[in-house]
Amino acid sequence: MFRATSRLHTVCQAARSTLALRPVKYAPAYKAVSLTMFNTSRLYATSGSTKVVPLTAEKYPGFNRNEQFKKLEDSDVDHFKAIVGETGLIYNNEDDLAAFNTDWMNKYRGQSQLVLKPKTTQQVADILKYCTEQSIAVVPQGGNTGLVGGSIPVFDEVVLSLQSMNSIRSFDDVSGILTADAGCILEGLDNWLNEKGYMMPLDLGAKGSCHIGGNLATNAGGLRLLRYGSLHGTVLGLEVVLPDGSILDSMSTLRKDNTGYDLKQLFIGSEGTIGVITGVSILTPRRPKAVNVALLGLNTYEDVQKAFKQSRSELSEILSAFEFWDNNALQIYKKHSDAKPLMENEYPFYVLIETSGSNKDHDDEKLTNYLENMMVDEVAQDGVVAQDETQIKNIWGVREGFTEALGKEAAVYKYDVSMPVNKINDCLEDMRQHLKDGGVFGQPDSPIIDVVGYGHVGDGNLHLNIAANRVDKRVPALIEPYLFEWVAKQNGSISAEHGLGVAKNQFLSYSKSDGMIKMMKTMKNLLDPKGVLNPYKYLPSQ
Amino acid sequence: MFRATSRLHTVCQAARSTLALRPVKYAPAYKAVSLTMFNTSRLYATSGSTKVVPLTAEKYPGFNRNEQFKKLEDSDVDHFKAIVGETGLIYNNEDDLAAFNTDWMNKYRGQSQLVLKPKTTQQVADILKYCTEQSIAVVPQGGNTGLVGGSIPVFDEVVLSLQSMNSIRSFDDVSGILTADAGCILEGLDNWLNEKGYMMPLDLGAKGSCHIGGNLATNAGGLRLLRYGSLHGTVLGLEVVLPDGSILDSMSTLRKDNTGYDLKQLFIGSEGTIGVITGVSILTPRRPKAVNVALLGLNTYEDVQKAFKQSRSELSEILSAFEFWDNNALQIYKKHSDAKPLMENEYPFYVLIETSGSNKDHDDEKLTNYLENMMVDEVAQDGVVAQDETQIKNIWGVREGFTEALGKEAAVYKYDVSMPVNKINDCLEDMRQHLKDGGVFGQPDSPIIDVVGYGHVGDGNLHLNIAANRVDKRVPALIEPYLFEWVAKQNGSISAEHGLGVAKNQFLSYSKSDGMIKMMKTMKNLLDPKGVLNPYKYLPSQ
């Protein structure tokens, strides 16, 4: 049963004039659940564990070590030791190397024997200069919270961890411009800014572990993109070390600067393949004084779109999140969670609406009017509004609990795609039918449990997940490239926010034209002619 | 006298509890004055005129025609005619060529004999392919409203005008994503979106003439940047023709797409030097339902900063403009305008505050509270709030009237710089002192009338203007490179939003490191190895 809790206010039961809202002060507490998930050191299957992560190079076909890369010699390690010092590296110590060689999902595993932890930009420069000179392959790594294996070595690449570069450099509390080292943890920056009345313009589940440098290198999207826009807009400057060891300094703290090509943009989303980000200058918004969260139950995907369109009109400048999930996703969540249901009945679709503003009373009134209109116009069938921080956490807890719940099934095929907003449910329904037609879904003995959808509907970003009760070779063959072709037909993206890494690089042509891929390869060759930086990833090998 | 008009409400005269606001519906009418200024065809000094604009190549030193560029032959013109048709070009007709050879300020003049007006992306591609093959230099041109001579030929470059590519391609009214040809006029797009409840995320004085393609090529900032962010964030996709004639298609209509280097960013702000933008996909915000405009008079620049910081906190999500000017700028304006004064007394500084929101009552309340706080805390000495569209127009009219007023002086030296917000007035005061020390300002017979400042203080963007009653050779020598050095010391930008063109390219090193300039040149050489696209501009010649 999925029932309204006693502390949650059910919109449909309220007289329109008496709808009572009690928004809470902004607090990031509701992210606590997911934070622990991203602590890589806790998740790695150690030798004492029953689970050993297979090597990426063996698990995925088509990887061959590039023999033009030098194998590490003692003299190389000595050279690196001279740069970063005795305590600035980990060498030939499997236990300590483990957390750097494996991702938090236990999906990818590399074979690096050396981790370097430089403390200064100059040390990063000295390392890269030597790596290029000696043809030593190197993988930059931030918080290691990625989903596509981008920060994990494939073979014996040296890991260049930014974790020891974690100082805030400056903050201007008139303009809200922050400069910081790349290794600062996102949540740490957000907490630091909180005391000054500001916040980071991005937020994601991994905030407790991910580095701001990694966020930039992967162009992280996340929960606040709808409101604060992409990093291409909020990042004002970068400090980047190029593969040849030169330091590209564009650490501007200016909102406006039209003097030449905006080269820093190339590195945002480049996944460490053409340079290593060591510093960032970013514009931070004022922290909102009031945050409200509501949940609506809806009958059709058309209603989801109506609710979104109307939210842009009525909630407009205070709308900070518009997330959706289908009832299929909720069923998987319920199976693995003992959380109380948020509504009395179930509906085919749900949307989570968050507002963030500077005036609590105004925000309450706008949200109340919006929710009333949604109910009166029968766009929504039911709705609840959080009355306190705990209830905000409960509602967000469902949205953020899908990943964990799905992870408890025997197998899950995860996709992160974007497309025009009106195509999202078609994508889910078509995939269900396709798997039924393929004989792997819909029968009592089918391997597929369900195709479920959730995501940032406001950004056209669907997290499509296919849960299975066992591994069946027919399944991946049915999904790929079928899904990629489907997305390509809608001019969508096969990777909305997760990036390419080793998971998607061979499928790039589904989202980018030959001309674009050719120019990307030209850029890579220009900046990293020996290809030492994060090899085997990002760009297709052919 | 500068006195409160009868229709304007004076904050200091109102009991705090009775401050009456009557915000108006959003209307772009207040831009009408400046629009006419940018109609290039009206401004060019024809042969019948007494004023002939000197040739850029003769007026500014250091220009030599690159003799590697082919001089146009009849066979070339025939080839172009075969691409664009008889009506798609202007050849050897001085009168018709004039508007393309001269900028609206009558500051730059080129010597092109051929203007091409392609109607399709393929025609642009065919033109550029031929130009590169034949080494024919070419200047892309949009609405020709630039301030640094970037779209005007220097010698005999062919002008490639985008004015015949002016169709809206698509609009998604759920997501607000617009795709359009590069030659669409900004105001036309804004008006078209208006009917659908959306708006363009940028606004500038030249909106009645400037093209969206030109806005992107110059990374236009303008009045809405404070609220809606830079084009690097709002542009989702571009269609660009490279110098070799290949079409780079990244016309994504997706808010999220992490598949490869974000190459389109390179072309935003590249001033037509590495490719010609032919199409754009851009995210448009909802048009606000209510707009308020207020004007404050302040005693110190510290108060300006306090007012700005507090506006970010109290007006937060509805703040859409925070403009400033000093009393020096106002005096020049008064000299050339018969508009009634807006306040009873004069103050050293003024700030214009605009709010745009979805709920008129809420916005009124926020603004009233803010203005009251500013008065009670004695941050502001006086203030007025517009009660209707005419008053909104009147207040904006002052801010937008400075350019025209300054243009009526015998000479004006215009600069567009950015720096940390707290340095803006220091820059003005220091420049005044420097010119006094240099003997050209402060005495009855001095050539300098005044150094005046206005601009987008919220963006750290100062328009520094030096008005003179006559041309005096000592003046420019005192200003440059003094000002650029001053700005460089603050890690500022010598061109905040106007770009480089032929006016600033030789001064790039004041804002960009050698490493950055080297990489810019590498990019230029990579994409335009023959250098045919917009030569003599943007990058320093040495």
Image: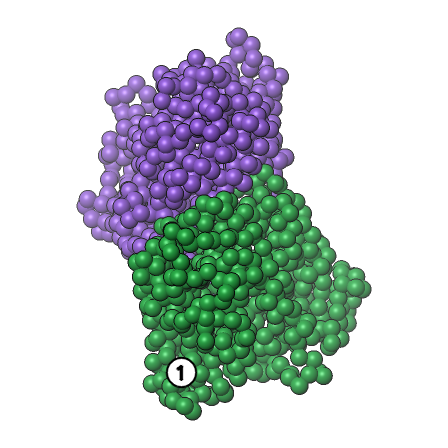
Chain colours: A purple, B green
Residue ranking furthest to the left: A86
Would residue A55 be visible to someone looking at this image?
A: no
Q: Residue at x 38, y 19 (%)?
A: A5
Residue B145 percent location from the top left of the image: 59, 67
Residue ranking furthest to the bottom: B445
Q: Does residue A158 appear to the left or right of B229 in the view shown?
A: left
Q: Does residue A151 appear to the left or right of B283 in the view shown?
A: left
The front one of B167 and A108 is: B167
Q: Secondary structure at mark 1?
A: helix
Q: Is residue B8 above or below residue A413?
A: below
- What chain does badge 1 belong to? B
Image quadrant in which you'd find residue A31: top left
Q: Is residue B441 above or below residue A19?
A: below
Residue B505 percent location from the top left of the image: 49, 71
The front one of A179 and A104 is: A179
Q: Residue at x 71, y 54 (%)?
A: B120
Q: Does residue A418 appear to the left or right of A361 in the view shown?
A: right
Q: Across the whole image, how many numbered discs are drawn on residues?
A: 1
In the image, what residue type sits under mark 1? Leu
The front one of A107 and B259 is: B259
Q: Residue at x 70, y 80 (%)?
A: B46
Q: How dense is the environment of label 1, judged by Cα within 10 Å: few (below 14), some, or many (20 and up)?
A: some
Q: Residue at x 22, y 45 (%)?
A: A88
Residue B224 percent location from the top left of the image: 50, 56
The front one of B291 and B213 is: B291
The residue labelled by disc 1 is: B478
Residue A503 percent location from the top left of the image: 47, 33
**Where is the N terminus of chain B found, in terms of image quarters?**
bottom left
Residue ranking furthest to the right: B86
Would residue A208 be visible to someone looking at this image?
A: yes
